[in-house]
Amino acid sequence: LQKIEADLHAGLWSSFFEEQAGTPFIWWHEFVHTMKRYHHYKGFSMFMQGIDPRGKDFVFKDFDVQEGVPVEMKTDESKDAEPAVSLKPDPENACYVAGNKDEIYGWVCNKKFMIEYPDAKAELKPIAGRFVLLDIPAAGGSYKLSFLATITGAELSASVVNAKSVPLQIPIPEFTIDVAFKMFRLPGADSVE
C-alpha cells in the first residue's frame, strides 16, 4: 500500500511541475475513500489555488537540492553567480520549479518517499540544512517566499528574499517527506541588471 500512496502523492504533485494539463485521478475506492487518503488531494488543491500558467511564459525546470550552509553569492561581470562555498548536490532529494519573473512555484521532495510513501512519520529523520539555487529568470528586487505543507496546505514559514542576482539562493526549511513553496515579486521591485 505504501507504493500506491507514493503513486497518489507523487502523481498529484509532479503533474504541475512536469507540464501536464492536469493531475492523474488515481482512484481506488478501498484505498482513497475507505482508508481516508483524501488529505493528499487537499494539500495539492490548496497549493494550486490561484495558479494559472497560461500565457505567462512559465519556465519548468528540475534542480538539485544542495547540502551545506548557504552564504552570500559572488557575481562576476557576466552576471554568472557562483556559491562562495563548495556545495554538494543531495542525491536523495529533488526540487521541481515552475514560474516566470513575477511568480515562482516549487516542490522539494525526498525521492525514495515518492517511490514508497512512509507509513509512520514519527520514525522519519528530519532533513535540514538544504537549499536550492534557482537559475530561472528573476525580475530582481524583493519576493515574498512562503513554504507550505503538502498535506494540509498550511503555511510553514514566510520571508522576503532579495533577488540581487541569479541564481536565487533559497533556504529550505526542515522537512521529512516533502515541502512546497511559492514566491511572488513584491510591488516596486527593481530588475536585476
Image: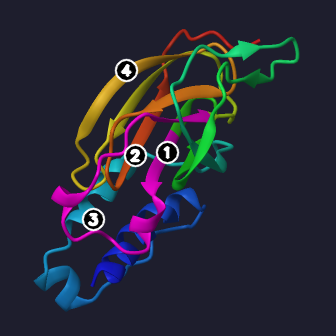
- Quarter of the rendering containing residue 146: top left
Magenta run includes residue 160: no
Q: Amino acid at mark 2?
A: Ala
Dot 4 or dot 1: first in sequence order is 1
Q: What residue is shown at x 26% (from left), y 48% (from top)?
A: 153
Q: Residues within 10 Å of mark 2 (few under 14, many from 20)?
A: many
In the rendered image, which residue does mark 4 sit on?
159
Tell me which residue sits at (30%, 79%) in the image: 2
Which is nearer the N-term, disc 4 or disc 2?
A: 4
Q: Label 1 belongs to which residue? A: 106
Label for residue 40?
A: 3
Q: Position of residue 15 (x, y in %)?
A: 50, 65
Q: How many numbered marks does the figure carry? A: 4
Q: CA distance from mark 3 to mark 4?
A: 26 Å
Disc 4 marks a residue whose amino acid type is Ser
Residue type beneath disc 3? His
Disc 1: CA contacts within 10 A as few (<14), some (14-19) or many (>=20): many
Local SS, label 1: strand
Q: Which residues are magenta?
A: 105-133
Q: Residues within 10 Å of mark 4 (few under 14, many from 20)?
A: few
Vertically, is 120 above or below 28? above
Residue type at tag 1: Gly
Query: Residue at the spot x=37%, y=75% of the render?
Result: 116
What separation in Å lies between label 1 and label 3 (alpha carbons)?
A: 17 Å
| Residue ID for mark 2 | 180
